[in-house]
Structures are given as C-alpha cells and as structure tokens.
Image (cartoon, rainbow, N blue to C red):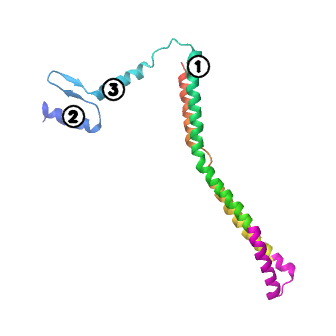
Amino acid sequence: MLSGRGLYKRIRGYIVRLGVPILVPRRKGWRVTEQQERVERFSKELREGPPPSERSIKEILDTLRPQLQQLLSKQIEMARTELIPVARQAGIATGLLVVGAVFMLLFLVFFFLTGMYFMVEVFGFPYWAAAGIDTVILLLIGGGLAGAGANKLRTLDPKPHRTIAALQENVEWVKGQLRP
C-alpha cells in the first residue's frame, strides 16, 4: 500500500495523463497552475455573463452595424471564392457541349453524305434509304454527346455550403446577442 509521497506521485501521473490541471506542491502549501487559473477565470466569466451595459439598444445596434456590414462583405467574398471553381467546371462542361455540337454539325454532314453515296454505290440502296440510315446514326452520336455533357452538368453542386453554414452561425449569434 502506498502512502504519502508515493501515492501523490501515482495519482499525479494518472491525472497528468488525462490532461486534468493539478495542484503542484510547494514548500508551504499548494500553488495553483496557470492552466487551472485560466480555466477558473473562464468558468467564472461564463457563469456570470457579460457585465451589464448602460447603452441603449439603438446605440448597441449602431455599433454593430459596421461590424455586420463587414461580416456580410466577407461572407459574399467567401461565397465568391467557393463558387469560382464550380463556375469554372460548369464553363468547361458548357464549352464541351458547344464544341461537340459544332463539330457534329460540320464534320458529320460531310461524313454522312459520303456514307450515303457509299451505300447507294456499293449496296444499291435508294437515296432515301441511305439518307434514313445516316440520319439514325447521326441521332445516336449526337444524343450520346449531348447526354455526356448533360450528365457532367448534373454532377456539379453549385451551392456554397461553407458560406451557408457560416451565415447560419452568424444569424444564430446575432439572435443570441439580442436576447435578454
């Protein structure tokens, strides 16, 4: 069984491992650690709350207005920085759709005219049947490219999640400040 100094060392070791502020022995009595003093001071402030103010609500709101304006401008700036990468990706996806459409219009007109004449000469199809087959093939390719571009646009998430969360936090804080 431990007693005296040995027991103190064992208990102090457990407490230090748990991260709890402890009292440190000195020659005459005990002294409080800095960490424990800060915790006590902070707890006291939390229990007592802020000191009462002699200012009117109008004066308080007048002092809050510039801070709220600055906060709002920072929120807008944060939303911009959050939305720029999404807008860039949306621009790339839209560009892919446009380039794909132009490419299909120019290239495939000549390709399918060639295919139509090939079917008439080699297989002996009438011109209307060769044109119908070319039209179906053109529809399948165009639909595939348009679907790929549309799927890429659907996967984008344009919501600025961090900005929305920060704004909600700020609204809750302001509500808390205005409550008695």
* Span of residues in magenta: 104-132
Name the residue that disc number 1 marks. 62
**Is-magenta flag for residue 180?**
no
Q: Nearer the viewer, residue 78 or 27?
A: 78
**Is-magenta flag for residue 114?**
yes
Q: Residue at x 84, y 79 (%)?
A: 129
Residue 163 in the image, given as x and y percentages of width and height: 57, 39
Residue 128 in the image, given as x and y percentages of width and height: 87, 78
User: Hey, what amino acid is under mark 2?
Assistant: Arg
Please give left or right for residue 154 compared with residue 130 in the image: left
Secondary structure mostly seen in the magenta stretch: helix
- Measured in 3D between alpha carbons, the distance from the residue under mark 3 to the one under mark 1, in whole angstroms, is 33 Å
Element carrying mark 1: helix
**Quadrant of residue 91 in the image?**
bottom right
- Measured in 3D between alpha carbons, the distance from the residue under mark 2 to the one under mark 1, in whole angstroms, is 52 Å
Q: Nearer the viewer, mark 2 or mark 1?
A: 1
Q: Measured along the vertical axis of the image, is residue 31 above or below residue 119? A: above
User: Hey, what amino acid is under mark 1?
Assistant: Asp
Q: Badge 3: how crowded within 10 Å, few (<14), some, or many (20+)?
A: few
Q: Residue at x 55, y 26 (%)?
A: 67
Q: Nearer the viewer, mark 3 or mark 2?
A: 3
Residue 84 in the image, given as x and y percentages of width and height: 60, 47
Q: Badge 2: how crowded within 10 Å, few (<14), some, or many (20+)?
A: some
Name the residue that disc number 3 marks. 38
- Measured in 3D between alpha carbons, the distance from the residue under mark 3 to the one under mark 2, in whole angstroms, is 20 Å
Label drawn at residue 12: 2
Q: Earlier in the sequence, mark 2 or mark 1?
A: 2
Q: Nearer the viewer, residue 129 or 109?
A: 109
Please say whether residue 170 is visible from this viewpoint: yes
